[in-house]
Image (cartoon, rainbow, N blue to C red):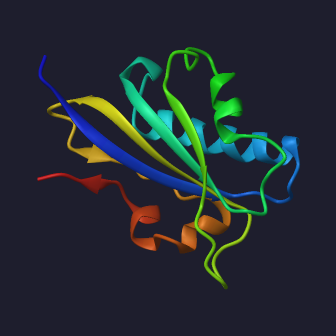
Amino acid sequence: MEWRVRAIRGATTVSENSIEAIAEAVTELLDELETRNHLKPEQIISTTFTATRDLDATFPAAIARQRPQWDNVPLLDVQQMHVPGSLERCIRFLVHVNLPAGQTKVHHPYLRGAKDLRPDWSLAPASFS
């Protein structure tokens, strides 16, 4: 089978700066990533999470690492650049994956308040030419 590297973006917002709220949002976001893209953790090359400066109760990668089969996925957390007026309590990711060459549609999950960041991607999967 022929494989291609693809990048998948996504984001969500968190109700409050607590471990529980961050865990809930990250879990929901990663569930959506895996389900909508028919993705298995062994296909993931690496994942970078960003969080806005108002989220410091836990690392999103620490939540991801607890998922089944995510213990070998390279994960990185960084702080999102602060821009006045930008979306607060936001977690984003950039995931690099190996997908079958014939899989041309990718769903970029934008959930909760983050749907407004990319309304064009929250409606339908992206297609590659």
Residue located 46% across and 70% down the image: 118
Return the residue nearer the eye: 76 or 101. 76
Q: Is residue 47 left or right of residue 59?
A: left
Q: Is residue 28 above or below residue 3?
A: below
Q: Is residue 92 above or below residue 86?
A: above
Q: Which residue is located at x 86 percent, y 42 percent?
A: 19
Give how far across and how far down residue 80 sits, in percent.
59, 61
Say which quadrant the N terminus sits in: top left
Within the image, what quadrant is residue 104 found in? top left
Whole-percent x and y of residue 109? 50, 52
Image quarter of residue 62: top right
Q: How many marks?
A: 0
Q: Residue at x 39, y 71 (%)?
A: 120
Q: Nearer the viewer, residue 49 or 27?
A: 49
Q: Position of residue 101 (x, y in %)?
A: 15, 32
Q: Is residue 111 left or right of residue 99?
A: right
- Name the image quarter holding residue 59: top right
Residue situated in front as seen by the camera: 70 or 29: 70
Q: Is residue 58 above or below residue 67?
A: below
Q: In the rendering, at what x and y percent does residue 77 appear?
A: 60, 43
Q: Residue furthest bottom?
A: 85
**Could you tell whether 66 is left or right of 102 in the image?**
right
Q: Residue at x 15, y 33 (%)?
A: 102
In this view, 9 is above or below 67: below
